[in-house]
Image (cartoon, grey):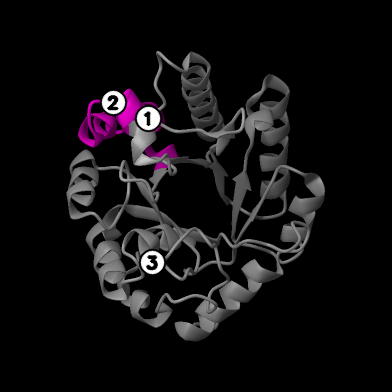
Amino acid sequence: MFPYLGLKASTNLAQIDERLRYHPQVFEFFTTADDVTTRGLQHLHDMIDYVKAAGVDKIVMHHPMKFEGQHNEVAVDRNSNPDGYHFLMTSSEDLIKLAIQTNTQVLIHGAYNSPVSEILKKNASLQSARQVVFDRLDQFKALGGDHVMFENSISPLFDFGDPAIEDLVIEHDYRLCYDTSHGFIVLHGDNRQLRASMAHLRNQIVHYHFVDSMGQFHDSLELGKGAIDWRELQSVVNPNATNIFEINLKDQMDSREMRASYRYLQMAWRTTH
């Protein structure tokens, strides 16, 4: 029952076992470039089976954040960075195929946070770069269907909180992951606007990253440690979605900050399951 105890881990078996000790209902794999090699994909498949065998049937694979030390941007320029473009496309396609095969989900970031100056070096305008993003997301949507979703960023290429982009997202009928901290940062810590944004996109949101923030930069705080007004968000979330708590951990082998966030949200929303 929503909200779920949703936990995140790498494909490292010891990390996975630590998360499974607490019986999460949702499990998200944070993948790296190593996980989308031939050997890595087989290991990921094995770990999906392992998590399923533990009784978890809601599983998400988070597309690799980086390639060769740089953010794996959907808008990567195929001419100046052919290796980056090849990695983006092949890794996305391979993960989508795996998701279809295992009946799981792939999460792809619509963007990360390339500086506007860098975006404009390779594109005539933000609008043209944004068009590249939407064209590629359309390809992934066509390939993945109900097995692929797209996450908001703090980049102007795919940032929720901007009504123009939200209208485009609705027009394209994308399945969405809404990261609360990213939305809050884009909106400069405005809780009213965050609530409006989440309400606007509610029907297309299939997964949440519940994360607190002070609304200034990417701080990934435990719930209750930032400035987001969680009580006001209960009425605008989609209860048919899944969720995880994507919190910075002091120790990757200890999910306590994620679990504490879940307890905080249960209290804020007065849920008892």
Q: Which residue is mark 2?
A: 123
Mark 2–mark 1 contact, CB under 8 Å?
A: yes
Q: Position of residue 113 (x, y in %)?
A: 43, 44
Disc 1 packing (10 Å; few <14; some 14–19; many ≥20): many
Q: Is residue 63 above or below residue 211?
A: above
Mark 2 vs mark 3: give the one in front: 2
Indicate the position of residue 119 as horizontal and vertical percent values.
35, 33
Dot 2 amino acid type: Asn
Q: Amino acid at mark 1?
A: Ala
Give above or below for 90 relative to 138.
Answer: above
- First in residue order: circle 2 vs circle 1: 1
Dot 3 corresponds to which residue? Answer: 239
Q: Residue at x 55, y 80 (%)?
A: 264
Determine if the magenta segment contains residue 126: yes
Chain part drawn in magenta: 120-149
Distance (Cα) linking label 2 and label 3: 39 Å
Instruction: Find residue 27 and name its label.
Output: none
Q: Which mark is residue 75?
A: 1
Judging depth in this view, the residue of 98 and 182 nearest the camera is 182
Amino acid tagged 3 = Pro
Q: Which residue is more in the foreground, 95 or 257? A: 257
